[in-house]
Every structure is written in structure tokens, then in C-alpha cells.
Image (cartoon, rainbow, N blue to C red):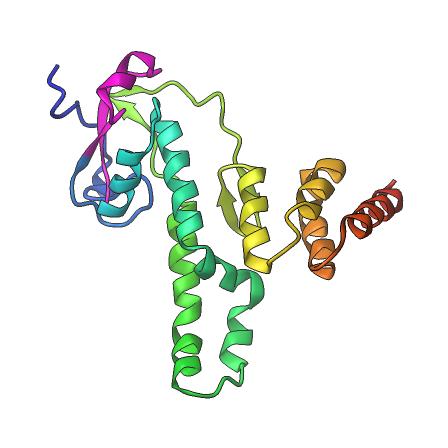
Amino acid sequence: MSFDHYPQIDIPFDVRYTCLFCGEPSNGDVNIPFSVDDIHNAPHDPLSVPACSECTSVVKKARCQSIYQYRNAVKAALTRKYQKALSIGSNWTEQELQESEFEGAAFEGFKRSAWMMYTIAKERVNYSGWSLCLDGIPLAADDDAGGFSFDGTEFVSVEHAIEHYIKTFHLDAVLLPELIKLLGKDKFGYAVRVSRLYLNISAAERTQIITDIVESQS
């Protein structure tokens, strides 16, 4: 097998020329795994997938073995890169943006484009691609899939969602993870709401808040 180009993954007709990772138009194929040093650790045969230039750049920097690991790496990279666009949906509804009373050219431009920026970013991050087959044979399922969904956005993991919301709302970097650790990820939304109430706290205040919240939930 040539290392220049691996066999292409099966592509349904309706997603020809579509990036497997984000759903944008593809502009070429990228090898999986990208580094030949990782071939022997891959759980499936080497393959190539269509990708856009942005996702291809992430793949080339990642050290992964399986297509599933690469998809997670790309999702994580896109979520971080477009954190500000994704945060629009956490801070506003589309109606609130339309009815907002922003003044000035810059604010008017934001008002017109913000929701579109949010929806495009969310669609790219949430894109799940298609069923993965090579020469008609499905690839083995990913046994390590640990995705987490919250407020309409798909995250690689609950830890990655925590990172995103800490950046989005400038939350205390210790309080939110501790609350979710103690309350469980099913209480993620509650933990975010509580954390937004306490943005600048001391270690002692944080400890007391955590104690009070946990006791109130028991």
C-alpha cells in the first residue's frame, strides 16, 4: 500500500465533496492515521477521508490512531476556535437579538450576523458525518465514545463542556468542575447557573458554596 494515499472511505452520493468532520465543502482527502508511525496502532485499516482545509490542518497536528479519535480532536479544536460564536446561543435567543437596542454601526452589524455565526458554528461542531464503511464493510464501533450534549451543542466530553462554559461566562475555574463532580453531569445546567452567581470568590467562599449546594441537593 502506498503511504501517499490510502483507500478512500465509502461516501454516500448525497455527501460527495463534503468534509467528514464538519459538513463544509471538502477540498481534498486526508490520510487516517495521518502519521505512518501510528498505522500499527490503528484499530482499522488505513483510510482516507474528505476534509476541508481547516479540519485537515487539525488532523495533521493531532497524534491519533482511529478515525473516531480524529473526529473528537477536530470537534474539540472547532469548539475552542469558535467559542465566542457558540457563546452567542448561551447568552441570547434569536428573538432577543432581533429585539435588542444596540446602537452604532458595529453593534448593528453584530445584531444582523450574530445568530447566523452561532448557527453555523453549532452545525459544524455538531456534525456527525455518515456511517463509516470501507469497501462496504462497516468500521468497528468506537468503544471509547464519551460525548456529552448540553444546550443543543455536542461536546467531546463533559470535561470539554466544562472548559467551554468557564470561558463563555468567565466562571470560577474550580467551582464548576467541583460542582459537577459532586452533583453529576445530569445537573450540568444547574451547576452552570450556580457558578454564574459566584464569579469572584475566595477559596473559603468556594468551599462554603460547594458545601451549601451539595447539602441542598441531598
Q: Examine the image and state in which quarter residue 129 appears.
A: top left
Viewer-closest of 39 and 93 = 39
Q: Tell me: 203 left or right of 41.
A: right
Q: Residue at x 24, y 27 (%)?
A: 34
Q: Residue at x 29, y 18 (%)?
A: 38
Q: Can residue 151 be seen in this view?
A: no
Q: Examine the image and state in which quarter residue 56 appears.
A: top left
Counting from the top left corner in percent of width and height, residue 143 is at: 48, 20
Q: How many marks?
A: 0
Q: Which residue is drawn at 43% across and 41% down?
A: 76
Q: Which residue is drawn at 49% across and 23% down?
A: 144
Counting from the top left corner in percent of width and height, residue 20 is at: 29, 39
Q: Can residue 117 be seen in this view?
A: yes
Counting from the top left corner in percent of width and height, residue 10 is at: 23, 28
Q: Tell me: 93 left or right of 52.
A: right
Give the extent of the magenta segment.
30-52
Q: Tell me: 138 left or right of 187.
A: left
Counting from the top left corner in percent of width and height, residue 84 is at: 46, 60
